[in-house]
């Protein structure tokens, strides 16, 4: 019940039907991380995304040997979508800031909802383009997040075998 409610409150999952959200909730695996524990390590392969159920995580990248925080994510926020949707390695470290419970959703469950929810794929590609821009130290003004999201959208569709 609490898991369905949590997933239903995630903005990108808004277009899903009650049945689809229920399916994702059933497929979700809960994990608890202690403060300071690494949830995702940059460079690792990954085929799942996570929703913060309780707690908080920090997204960090390493720049010239120093760690830079790109975002702090709270309850109801998601992460790990980039590697899941592109097949590329994890782009950043994600570290629990406090005791944090996450819901892990795998490739197979996401593929099911992708097939019937093109809106979800589109909103995800836009968010991913914005997040990608936040990962690089200096903004390359030649490509905007909007331009980039089209490229990401087609990459996701290719990776998931959607039209
Ligand atoms: P992924 O690359 O699979 O693993 C690291 C995650 O950090 C990434 O997916 C995103 O979910 C998240 N992330 C990367 N950059 C940002 C950002 N600028 N803002 C918020 N989250 C981000």
Image: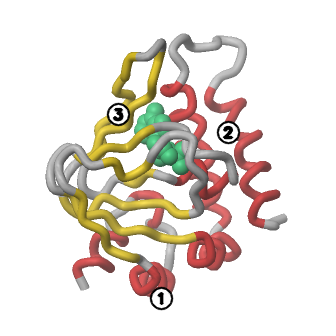
Q: Which residue is mark 1?
A: 19
Q: CA separation, marks 1 and 2?
A: 28 Å
Q: Within 8 Å: ligand 1 and the Cβ of disc 3? A: yes
What is the x, y in percent for residue 7?
Answer: 36, 70
Left-right relation of 27 to 36:
right
- Percent x, y of residue 159: 77, 59
User: Disc 1 or 2, which lies upstream in sequence?
Assistant: 1
Give the spatial CA distance, label 2 vs label 3. 19 Å
Picture quadrant of residue 160: bottom right
Mark identifier at residue 145: none
Nearer mark to the viewer, of 1 and 3: 3
Query: Residue 81: x, y in percent?
Result: 53, 53
Depth check: 96 or 153 in front? 96
Tell me the residue that label 2 is attached to.
149
User: Is the residue marked by circle 2 packed among few (<14), some (14-19), or many (20+) residues within 10 Å?
Assistant: many
Bin the neighbour count of mark 3 within 10 Å (Cα to Cα): few under 14, some 14-19, many 20 and up.
some
Q: How many marks?
A: 3
Q: Nearer the viewer, residue 10 or 32?
A: 32
Which residue corresponds to the image point at 42% horizontal and 68% vertical from the top-left? 104
Residues marked 1 and 2 touching at CB (< 8 Å): no
Q: Residue furthest front?
A: 65
Q: Residue at x 62, y 29 (%)?
A: 145
| 143 left or right of 32 in image | right
| Sequence-first tag of 2 and 3 | 3
Give the labeled residue for mark 3. Answer: 71
Marks 1,3: beta carbons within 8 A? no
Name the quarter where the C terminus is drawn. bottom right
Cβ of mark 1 under 8 Å from ligand 1: the answer is no
């Amino acid at each position: 019940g609490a898991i369905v409610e949590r997933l239903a409150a995630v903005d990108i999952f808004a277009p899903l039907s009650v049945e689809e959200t229920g399916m994702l909730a059933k497929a979700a695996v809960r994990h608890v991380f202690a403060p300071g524990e690494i949830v995702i390590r940059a460079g690792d392969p990954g085929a799942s995304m996570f929703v913060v159920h309780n707690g908080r995580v920090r997204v960090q990248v390493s720049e010239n040997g120093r760690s830079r925080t790109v975002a702090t994510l709270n309850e109801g926020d998601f992460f790990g979508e980039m590697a899941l949707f592109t097949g590329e390695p994890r782009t950043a470290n994600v570290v629990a800031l406090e005791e944090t419970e996450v819901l892990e959703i795998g490739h197979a469950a996401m593929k099911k909802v992708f097939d019937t929810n093109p809106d979800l794929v589109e909103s995800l590609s836009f968010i991913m383009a914005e997040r990608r821009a936040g990962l690089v130290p200096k903004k390359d003004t030649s490509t905007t997040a909007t331009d980039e999201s089209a490229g990401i959208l087609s990459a996701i569709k290719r990776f998931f075998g959607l039209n």
